Amino acid sequence: MAIASYPVVSLNTGFNPCPPGMGLGNFGRVGVLGFCFAHLPAFLYALSSVLWKGFCMSGKPLNPLDASWLLVESRHTPMHVGGLIPFTLPDDAAPDFLRQLLADFRACERVAAPWNHRLRLPGLKNLMPVWEEETDIDLEYHVRLSALPKPGGERELGQLIARLHSQPLDLGRPPWECEFIEGLEGRRFALYIKMHHSLIDGISGMRLLVRAMSTDPVASLRLPPFFAVGMPARPRREEPAPTA
C-alpha cells in the first residue's frame, strides 16, 4: 500500500510536512519517514503552543511546579500547607470579642488575589489547569470558629490542629480556609490558616499574613482581613536613561 493513500489531518500550526509544490506521493517511504522525524520537534513545539494558547485563554495557567502539586494530591496525601498564629486578647476585650471579629471577617466585601482564585481542572475544553477569579465567595465556609474546652493547653490545641490539617481542601472553591480558635489558656486565641501548595507556598503565605498585621494593637484593629490585602504590587522597572 502506498503511504500517500493514508489520510492526512491538517492543523493550522504553521508547519507544512511537505515542501511547496510537492505531495506525499513524490516521496519514497523512507524519505517521508525521515523528513517527518527530522521535523517532529518543530511540529510538536508548534502544536503545544497552539494547544496551550487555545486552552488557557480564559484563566491564569499554573506553572509546571504548581501544577505538580495537583498531580500528587490524594485523600491520603493532601498537598496543602498551614500556619498557626497565637494571639493574646486585648485587656478590655468583651466576652464576645472573638465572635465579633469572626463576623467582621465574614462581612468583608473584598477578597483579593490570590485568595479569590479558584482552580479549573483539566477537562474536554481545557487540557491544562488554570486559575480563575471567583467573584461569589462564601466566607461563612472559608472563615470558621472552633472552641477548646477551657482552659485549652498545647496538647488540646495540637489535637485540634492535627484534625483540621488532615482534612483535604475543597478544590471546587478557592483552596484556603481560616479557623478562629478560642478557649486557649492565658487569655489567648489562635488563627489557623491552611492553603493549597499550588496556590501559595508556605513562605509566601506567611509574608501575606504579616502584611495584614501590625505591631500597634490599636492600628491592628483597623486593618482589613488578610484575604482583603492580597499580593503587593510589583514595582515598575525604570528604563535606563538614554545616552548620547
Image (cartoon, grey):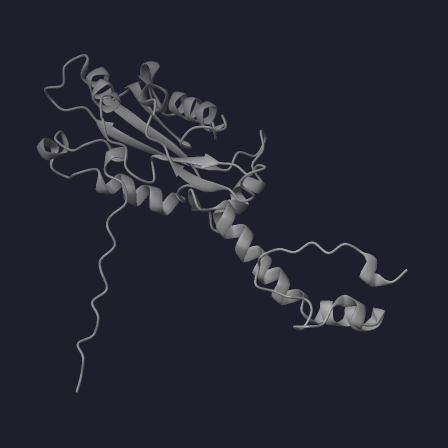
Q: Is residue 81 visible?
A: yes
Specify the quadrant that holds the C terminus: bottom left
User: Does residue 72 sit above or below 236 in this rendering?
Assistant: above
- Residue 236: x and y in percent read 22, 60
Of 124 and 197, the residue lying toward us: 124
Q: Residue at x 27, y 39 (%)?
A: 209
Residue 117 relative to residue 224: left or right: right
Q: Residue at x 61, y 65 (%)?
A: 15
Q: Is residue 64 visible?
A: no
User: Does residue 82 sit above or below 68 in this rendering?
Assistant: above
Of 104 and 16, the residue lying toward us: 16
Q: Residue at x 62, y 60 (%)?
A: 44
- Residue 225: x and y in percent read 23, 31
- Residue 22: x and y in percent read 72, 72
Residue 204 relative to residue 20: left or right: left
Q: Which residue is drawn at 49% across and 51% down?
A: 53
